[in-house]
């Protein structure tokens, strides 16, 4: 019998559809995260124009996301809603897998439903998995790898170890620091398999190499650019270095565990408590719970290392911490050796999950609908400036007032996602403008990074037809007023804080569109 008398085959479908409905609503109302601008614009350049990351423009992340999101948008349209829709689907698939995995490992639908509620209403998941960034894509690969590793240990399918390695490799191709999961799972397979302890790690390693092929290809084709973009850049983007500012890191940990509700109410205090609880009950835990605890600890350590450390980095821990918590509680409940007590404990957890869900729902207005409490609002900007409709209107103004071959200068590439116009070379990533000032100009040019002091030169370039000064640069209109005037730009649109300037020479003619 399925959960709540549903036919068994309909349970996963219902779980998936329920998540898609909620996640889709919130994702389409959430203000744009500034990082989404360069992720989706890079995906568009790759899929629509054949421009290659690293070789043709600076891209400071691992290579897989633009291929996945670019391919998706090629099918469903290049735009914010299409990009967000893929994140919604990935997030819902993780939730469905979480529900099914816990129900299978504990044989209790009530615990699976509790876990699902803790996941679906986790504010960190809702705020960051639903954006077109690395979190949902990297997490679904690692989550699937964990399930495959558990199957490999059981001995039912030796080749599931290869699948686990492949999936960890793919997660690393989205987010580099997920590489820390590789030795954890490989060691787990080696220690837990009794018949042939060496075979599974080798199969896992083979799968990891296959999953890492995208990076290997770029390492062969453009080695210097690839190494700089994915690693060296991250050591210079902050003046304090790659791993520094311990006080700032401690502040983030404090915010996660003991901070006020504020912007991001999460269950991290409760979820992290699952780790010591699980260690106390280690011998009674099932394999999936054990792997989840190991991955949770590993990901937590590596998430605190980058400088600066951000709270959003820890959202990737949530699915693994939930399995750790529910699996540990299941082991504790079973130790009661009284079925009525066990059932009562499960009902208590469900009640708590429902109360948390209700509390989290009260935050939706400030975080998603009105968005006045949403993270990522720069000082001097309003939620309206980061609404999808606002950004699409800016794109429309650019398109209406320029020819297709005119370049657009903008310190934030997100404005060009739906404009069908190319951004000025070197401005495909907003972070390079500042970081490039920390390396010699010759290197910045070689790595295709626009320097902040070259911004006036970009305005003077005859190929430039439009300039957008808005999100990420909304305070700089006065700084470039002289250059705008000297190069005959005129203001043609004001949308929120965004000002759109064009040259008459770039104006479209009747046959240019």
Image: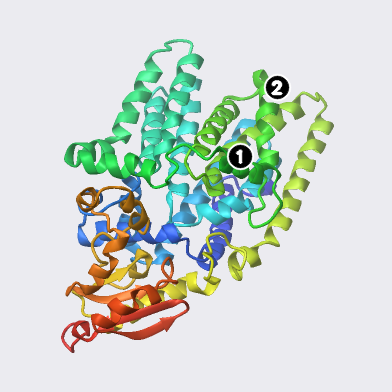
Mark 2, mark 1: which one is toward the viewer? 1
Measured along the vertical axis of the image, is residue 223 above or below residue 419?
Answer: above
On-image quarter of the N terminus: top right
Return the x and y of residue 385 as percentages of the image width and height: 49, 73
Residue 169's quadrant in the figure? top left
Instruction: Report the residue at 47% width, 50% height from top.
Output: 90
Residue 433's quadrant in the figure? bottom left
Return the x and y of residue 14 as percentages of the image width and height: 58, 53
Looking at the image, residue 469 sits to the left or right of residue 341; the answer is left
Return the x and y of residue 326 as percentages of the image width and height: 67, 35
Return the x and y of residue 509 as percentages of the image width and height: 18, 88
Cα distance in 3D space between marks 2 and 1: 26 Å
- Toward the top, the furthest residue is 195
Looking at the image, residue 440 sits to the left or right of residue 369; the answer is left
How many numbered tags mark residues here?
Answer: 2
Looking at the image, residue 127 sits to the left or right of residue 366; the answer is left
Q: Are marks 2 and 1 in contact (CB under 8 Å)?
A: no
Residue 489's quadrant in the figure? bottom left
Q: Return the residue at label 2.
A: 280
Measured along the vertical axis of the image, is residue 410 above or below residue 67?
Answer: below
Instruction: Report the residue at 69% width, 34% height from top.
Output: 273
Q: Can residue 318 be seen in this view?
A: no
Q: Return the residue at label 1.
A: 250
Measured along the vertical axis of the image, is residue 230 above or below residue 492?
Answer: above
Q: Can residue 452 be seen in this view?
A: yes
Instruction: Report the residue at 31% width, 57% height from top.
Output: 42
Q: Looking at this view, is 259 or 38 the one in front?
A: 259
Q: Which of marks 2 and 1 is nearer the N terminus?
A: 1
Q: Residues within 10 Å of mark 1 (few under 14, many from 20)?
A: few
Looking at the image, residue 261 sits to the left or right of residue 73; the answer is right
Q: Is mark 2 on a helix, strand or loop?
A: helix
């Amino acid at each position: 019998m399925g959960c709540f008398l549903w036919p068994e085959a309909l349970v996963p479908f219902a779980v998936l559809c329920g998540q898609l409905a909620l996640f889709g609503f919130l994702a389409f109302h959430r203000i744009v995260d500034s990082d989404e601008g360069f992720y989706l614009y890079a995906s568009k350049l790759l899929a629509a124009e054949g421009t290659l990351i690293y070789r043709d423009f600076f891209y400071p992340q691992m290579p897989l996301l633009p291929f996945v999101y670019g391919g998706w948008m090629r099918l469903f349209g290049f735009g914010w809603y299409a990009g967000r829709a893929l994140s919604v689907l990935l997030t819902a698939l993780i939730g469905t897998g979480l529900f099914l995995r816990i129900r299978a490992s504990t044989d209790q639908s009530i615990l699976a439903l509790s876990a699902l509620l803790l996941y679906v209403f986790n504010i960190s998941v809702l705020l960051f998995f639903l954006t077109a960034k690395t979190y949902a894509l990297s997490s679904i690969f690692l989550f699937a790898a964990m399930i495959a590793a558990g199957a490999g240990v059981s001995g039912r399918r030796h080749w599931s170890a290869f699948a686990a390695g492949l999936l960890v490799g793919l997660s690393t191709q989205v987010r580099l620091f997920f590489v820390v999961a590789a030795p954890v799972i490989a060691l787990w397979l080696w220690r837990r398999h009794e018949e042939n302890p060496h075979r599974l790690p080798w199969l896992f390693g083979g799968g990891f190499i296959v999953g890492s092929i995208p990076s290997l290809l770029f390492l062969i084709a453009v080695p210097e650019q690839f190494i700089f973009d994915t690693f060296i850049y991250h050591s210079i983007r902050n003046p304090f270095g790659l791993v520094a500012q311990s006080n700032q890191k401690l502040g983030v940990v404090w915010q996660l565990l003991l901070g006020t509700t504020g912007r991001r109410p999460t269950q991290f205090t409760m979820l992290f408590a699952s780790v010591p609880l699980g260690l106390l009950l280690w011998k009674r835990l099932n394999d999936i719970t054990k792997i989840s605890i190991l991955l949770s600890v590993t990901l937590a350590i590596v998430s605190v290392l980058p400088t600066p450390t951000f709270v959003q980095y820890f959202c990737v821990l949530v699915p693994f911490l939930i399995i750790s918590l529910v699996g540990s509680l299941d082991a504790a409940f079973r130790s009661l050796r009284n079925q009525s007590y066990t059932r009562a404990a499960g009902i208590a957890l469900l009640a708590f999950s429902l109360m948390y869900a209700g509390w989290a729902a009260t935050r939706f207005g400030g975080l998603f609908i009105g968005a006045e409490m949403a993270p990522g609002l720069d000082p001097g900007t309003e939620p309206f400036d980061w609404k999808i409709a606002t950004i699409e209107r800016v794109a429309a103004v650019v398109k209406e007032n320029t020819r297709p071959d005119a370049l657009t200068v903008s310190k934030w590439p997100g404005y060009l996602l739906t404009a069908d116009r190319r951004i000025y070379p070197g401005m495909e990533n907003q972070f390079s403008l500042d970081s490039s000032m920390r390396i010699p100009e010759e290197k910045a040019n070689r790595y295709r990074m626009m320097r902040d002091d070259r911004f006036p030169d970009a305005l003077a370039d005859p190929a430039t037809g439009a300039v957008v000064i808005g999100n990420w640069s909304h305070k700089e209109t006065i700084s470039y007023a002289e250059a705008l005037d000297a190069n005959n730009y005129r203001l043609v649109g004001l949308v929120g804080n965004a000002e759109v300037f064009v040259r008459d020479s770039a104006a479209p003619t009747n046959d240019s569109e």
